[in-house]
Image (spheres, grey):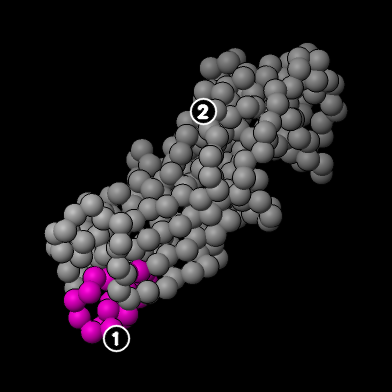
Amino acid sequence: MKTILFLFLLISNVVFAQNEFKHEVYFDTSEYKIPTIEENRLLLFIQKIDSVEVEKISIYGFCDDIGSDTYNLNLSQQRADIIKDLFSNNNIDKTLIRNVDGKGEILLKIVNTKDINIIRSLNRKVEIIVQIKPSKSSVVPDKEETKKSTSVEFVVGDKIVLKNILFEIGYRTVLEESKEALDNLAEILIERENIYFRIQGHVCCTQNSRDAVDAETKKQNLSLVRAKFIYDYLAKKGVSKKRMKYVGMRRKFPLGGDPKFDRRVEILITYISDKKK
């Protein structure tokens, strides 16, 4: 079996000016349970980092100045731990979480207020720092390169990897700039009408081979619905549904190395008929 890379590399509109994302979660006095509003904000943040290549995640808990040093240190650690648990329960790979530390009290020196209650409320928090890997630039292939792909001789078991097909964060739909690559793929598959294939969706960064959560439906089947999106897209372009099947592979087959390669869709050749256009 050979793997064929069609280099449908597209220029992304997303440019990161920094190599990390930060988020803060605020707590009530003497509490480490996450308030509902703060939990919702954090879930949105988790969806945001689903689309980037995470290097590591650091979680730091803090308290205000009320209470003993020992009490505050324990409470700040409990706050950090509950944030870690929420990340893990939402399919963030726990190996990416490198630091989970309670720091006790923190003194905010740059706050434009003398109200001690406001200052204390800003101290009751967990700070999350997500370090990401820098994005690499990509280019659009010229038409002649795409035409060459139609001359490849396929056999059953060959795998076409759709490289850098970019999806909306946490959703099944691809970004607008990825549609040219899908259109090129559709042209190839229409040309090679004797090929039958299975569309396989994969996700990255979840625990124990789990699937990721579809933000639209809240169901844990993101790899499946992303494969279904490709299936529907190709069908609308004229590829016969009789030639296609789709399946979600969850995170059963991570490639290792850069997480972006696990956020992928593949075309597995399952049958080749004698009929050839």
Q: Quadrant of residue 62?
A: bottom left
Highlighted magenta segment, given as a residue range? 61-81
Q: Residue at x 38, y 48 (%)?
A: 45
Is 70 included in the stretch rendered in magenta?
yes
- Mark drawn on residue 31: none
Q: Main secondary structure of the magenta part?
A: helix
Query: Please, is residue 203 above or below residue 245 in the view?
Result: below
Q: Residues within 10 Å of mark 2 (few under 14, many from 20)?
A: some
Pointer 1 residue: 70
Q: Identify the image quadrant of the N terminus.
A: top right
Q: Give coordinates of residue 223: x percent, y percent.
A: 52, 43
Q: Secondary structure at mark 1?
A: helix
Q: Quadrant of residue 162?
A: top right
Query: Please, is residue 244 above or below residue 249 in the view?
Result: above
Q: Give coordinates of residue 243: x percent, y percent.
A: 64, 26
Q: Give coordinates of residue 221: x percent, y percent.
A: 45, 46
Reading the chain from its start, which is encountered first: label 2 or label 1? Answer: 1
Distance, label 2 to label 1, CA atoms, is 49 Å
Q: Amino acid at mark 2?
A: Leu
Query: Please, is residue 237 above or below residue 224 in the view?
Result: above
Q: Give coordinates of residue 129: x percent, y percent.
A: 45, 57
Q: Identify the image quadrant of the C terminus.
A: top right
Q: Amino acid at mark 1?
A: Thr
Q: Are marks 2 and 1 in contact (CB under 8 Å)?
A: no
Could you tell me if residue 104 is visible in this image?
Answer: yes
Is 63 included in the stretch rendered in magenta?
yes
Could you tell me if residue 223 is visible in this image?
Answer: no
Q: Secondary structure at mark 2?
A: loop
Judge by depth and name the residue closer to the eye, 136 or 93: 136
Q: Residue at x 16, y 58 (%)?
A: 114
Left or right of 38 in this view: 147: right
Pointer 2 residue: 175
